[in-house]
Image (spheres, coloured by chain):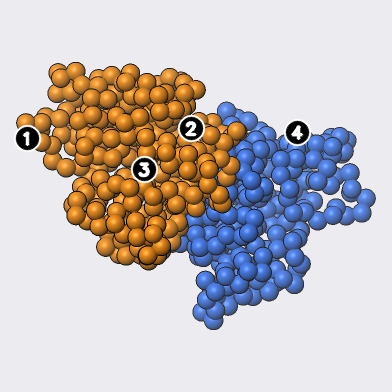
Chain colours: A orange, B blue
Amino acid sequence: MTGRSIAQDAELALLLEVTGTPKPGNVDRTHDHDDLRFEHFMAGAVGARPGLERAADGERVGRVFERAVAGMAQQSAGNTQFGALLLLAPLVAAAHDDALTPAGVDEVVKRTTVADAADFYRAFEHVDVAVDDPPSGLEPLDVRRGADAVPAIEERALTLCDVMDRSAEVDGVAAEWVGGFERVFGAAERIVDGDGPVPDRGAAVFLELLAGEPDTFVVKRSDRETAEMVQRRAQAVLDGEADAAELADELVDRGINPGTTADLVAGALFVALRRGVEV
Amino acid sequence: MTGRSIAQDAELALLLEVTGTPKPGNVDRTHDHDDLRFEHFMAGAVGARPGLERAADGERVGRVFERAVAGMAQQSAGNTQFGALLLLAPLVAAAHDDALTPAGVDEVVKRTTVADAADFYRAFEHVDVAVDDPPSGLEPLDVRRGADAVPAIEERALTLCDVMDRSAEVDGVAAEWVGGFERVFGAAERIVDGDGPVPDRGAAVFLELLAGEPDTFVVKRSDRETAEMVQRRAQAVLDGEADAAELADELVDRGINPGTTADLVAGALFVALRRGVEV
C-alpha cells in the first residue's frame, strides 16, 4: 500500500499519465503541442492538488472539482486536466469512503446535488473547455455560461448526476459518471496486472482505450470521422500493423489530441495506485 | 506572482528540473538510467511536498528536510532528490521569512541548531546516498550511521550549519549552504532573464553550472578526473563545439549522472518561480 495520501495519489496519477509515452496525439515525454506543453501538465497537477485535498474533510464532489480546476488553471496553457479532474473528484471521494469500486463511486455520483451541479458550472469560469453548442431549447444550460447558468440549474433542480446524464452520449467522461466508471476500472485492472514501468502500462491502456471507442474530445474539436480514423489507427497499432511512435508524431503534427482517452488513463492510474501499484 | 503556495512552488521546481531536456547525464524527458527513471522523480516530488509544507508552521529546517526526504523515498528507486531537498529546505524557510535572498537564506542557515543536525543525520536512514568515507578520526560523524551518530553530534554541539561547513569542500550542496547560495541565486537570475519555456531555461543553466565547476556527485561516484572531463565537455557544448543531446546520450550510457548540478537547478527554479516566472 502506498504511503501517500489519497490526494497525493491523485496528483501522481496526473503526472504519470502525461509521462506515459508514446500516447498518440497527446502530450507525452517526446511530444508537445504548440500551445500545450509537458510543463503545463506538471503545473496543472501541482495546482490541482489542494482542491483534491478538500475531499479529506468531506467537501462535496462538485466543490472539490471546482477548486481543483481553479488550481489547475494556474499556468499559462489553460485547460490541461479538466476532464481528468472530473473523473478524479468522484474517485477520490469513493476512496475516502473506503469504497473505490464501481458500486462505491456510483454511490458518490448518486448523492450529488444541485449544489454540485452549480459548482460544475462555476468550474467553466476558470478555463476554456471544448464543448459543443447545447441542443435547441437548452441554451440556458450551456456550460459556457458558467455561473450565469446556475439559476437555470436550480430552477430545474438538476443534480450533477443529472447534468452528466444529459451529456453521456456525447462526452466520454460523462459516460463514465453514469456508467459505473466501467472503462476506468477496466483499465486500472490491466495496469495492476501489467508488467514494467507504470507509465509504460499507462501508455499501453491508452492505446487499448483509444482503439475501443471514438475519443469524444476529438469529436468535439474535429469531427466524428476524424475520431473514428484515430480509433482505427490505434487498432492497427495494437494489431502490429502500425507503429505507435509514428502515429504519435502524425497526430501531434495534425493537432489531433485524444484528450478524453488521456483523462480515462489518469483515472485508471489513480485506481491502480490505490490498489498498490508501485512506482 | 504565482497563485501557488511556497511548498507547491518547491514541488513544481523539482518537477520542472527533471523536465528540462537535455541535461547531459541526468534523467530528463528523453533519458532514464536503468534503475532511476523519470517517474521516480515524479513520485519523489509528490512525496516530498508534505514535508516541505511543514515550513509554513515554522517547523525547523532540519525536520522539514528529514520529513521531505522520508516522503521522497516512497518510490522504488531510492535517492532521487536528496540534494535538491537539502537546498530547498532553507530556501523555503527564507521564502516564509519573506526574505528569499542570499542574506535571508544565510540567516536561516546561521540559526540552525544541533537538533537540525540530528534531523539531517536521521534523513540518511530513509535512503542510500552516495558519500565518501569520513576523514580519519571523524568516523563517529559518518552520515551513514544515521541516528546512531546523533550522540556524537550532540556531544560536539554541532549545528547543521557546522556540519555543512565541514563538507563544503567536497560537496556542492554544502558549499551553497555556507556560501550564501551563490550559484543557486545566480542561476535563478538567468532563468528569470531567459526566454522560452521554463524547462528549457533550466536545461540551459544546467549546462552553464556543469561547465562552471566539477560536479561533486560525479566526484564521489566516479572520481575527480571524470568530473573534470564532464566539466570540459559541457564547456565544449557551450562553445558550440559539441552537441548537448549527444553528450547526454554518452553520459547516460556511461552511467555518469551529475546529480549535484541538477540539485542546483532545482533550487534555482524554485527561486525563479517565487520571482514570478510563469509556466
Q: Decide if residue B201 is on the left or right side of residue A127.
A: right
According to the picture, the residue beneath numbered tag 1 turns out to be A136
Residue B211 horizontal side relative to residue B228, left or right:
left
User: What residue did someone put label 2 on?
Assistant: A7
What residue lies at 57% left-to-right and 70% top-to-bottom?
Answer: B249
Callout 4 touching callout 1 (CB < 8 Å): no
Q: Chain of mark 3?
A: A
Q: Is residue B250 above or below residue A14?
A: below
- Name the residue type under label 2: Ala
**In this view, A179 is above or below B86:** above
Q: Are marks 1 and 3 on the same chain?
A: yes
Residue at x 29%, y 57% (from the top left corner): A232
- Residue B62's spot in the image, x, y percent? 69, 37
The residue at 34%/60% (across/down) is A236
> Would you say A8 lies left or right of B83 here?
left
In this view, which residue lies farthest toward the front? Answer: A239
Where is residue A196 shown, x and y percent of the image?
A: 56, 51
- Pointers 2 and 1 in contact (C-beta within 8 Å): no
Asked if the residue at tag 2 contacts the one at tag 3, i.e. Cβ–Cβ closer than 8 Å, the answer is no
Please give the residue where the numbered disc 3 appears in the rendered image: A263
The answer to whether dots 2 and 1 both sit on one chain is: yes
Residue situated in front as seen by the camera: A251 or B151 = A251
Q: Secondary structure at mark 2?
A: helix
Q: Is label 4 or label 3 in front?
A: 3
- Find the residue positioned furthest to the right: B137
Camera-near label (2 vs 4) is 2
Tag 1 secondary structure: loop
SS of the residue at dot 4? helix
Measure the alpha-carbon separation of dots 1 and 3.
Answer: 28 Å
Question: Residue drawn at (32%, 20%), measured in percent from left and top?
Answer: A110
Name the mark on residue B115: 4
